Image (cartoon, rainbow, N blue to C red):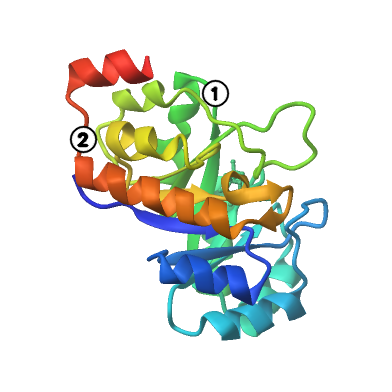
Amino acid sequence: MTRPHIKICGLKTEGHIDTVLARGCSEVGFVHFERSPRHLSIEDMIRLRAHVGGRALVTVVTVDADDEFLKRLATRVRPDVIQLHGSETAARVAAVQALTGATVMKAIPVTSMADLEEIERFRPVADRILLDARAPKTSNIPGGNGVSFDWGLLDALESRDFTLSGGINPDTIEAAVRRVAPRGLDVSSGVEREPGVKDDGLIHRLFDAFEAAVEAGPLPLHEEKRRFA
Ligand SMILES: O=C(O)c1ccccc1N[C@@H]1O[C@H](COP(=O)(O)O)[C@@H](O)[C@H]1O
């Protein structure tokens, strides 16, 4: 089993950035979406990006952003990765790549097998694919809702070349690592004490559970069925 890389998303303070980096996080995410409790301005992102320095990849989450904003983001914040978490089409993904020169990660909401067909639509144009739960109808943000989808659906995929997100927390990360075994994991609200407020204790619990799961290795099939059915 390859060790998945971990992105902690929705970071807003230098202190929490230092905590996740000290625990081996290789990618930090900033959210630019005004309705989100994790929203950061361009100025905030410039400051935090400088604090990260070269210690990890910096990803900025956007939702159906326009060209003018994306150009400003690329020139002023210079993120390594731009995450497209809205209803962007494949053509739009290619256009964002050409416009910004950044690595582009496209989020695909999953509820059923049919949604997994979207992977083939985006794979040729997106540098990375993120599989997330679809937002509950009661939520006004498309991600960061702390809900998972049925990870058993992913058994049908041949490739593990995706980042898994949605509802990963200190209690669920073992299944994410040992049962799903994706290339990357993306965690936001699962390490928060309230929406938009990260918690050092939860961050440490998450990384402790992650290290234990990696150490334990993949689950044998019979055990997998018994524990995560
Ligand atoms: O976190 C947000 O506020 C957010 C807002 C708009 C789009 C995406 C957002 N976050 C992404 O949601 C997933 C999963 O979050 P969680 O771990 O279930 O809370 C993750 O990819 C974030 O980047």
Q: Position of residue 196 (x, y in %)?
A: 72, 54
Q: Is 90 left or right of 145, judged from the image as shown?
A: left
Q: Earlier in the sequence, mark 1 or mark 2?
A: 1
Camera-side residue: 217 or 87? 217
> From the image, which quarter does the N terminus lie in?
top left
**Residue shown at 75% from the left, 42% from the top:** 141
Secondary structure at numbered mark 1: loop
**Which residue is under mark 1?**
111
Q: How many marks?
A: 2
Q: Is mark 2 within 8 Å of ligand 1?
A: no
Q: Is mark 1 within 8 Å of ligand 1?
A: no
Secondary structure at numbered mark 2: loop
**Which residue is under mark 2?**
218
Q: Position of residue 8 (x, y in %)?
A: 52, 58
**Residue shown at 54% from the left, 38% from the top:** 166
**Residue shown at 21% from the left, 50% from the top:** 2
Give, as a three-letter code, the residue at label 1. Answer: Thr
Q: Position of residue 90 (x, y in %)?
A: 53, 47
Give, as a three-letter code, the residue at label 2. Answer: Pro
**Residue shown at 27% from the left, 21% from the top:** 224
- Are discs 1 and 2 less than 8 Å apart at CB? no
In space, the residues marked 1 and 2 are separated at their CA atoms by 24 Å
Q: Is residue 38 above or below residue 80?
A: above
Q: Is residue 41 above or below residue 5?
A: below
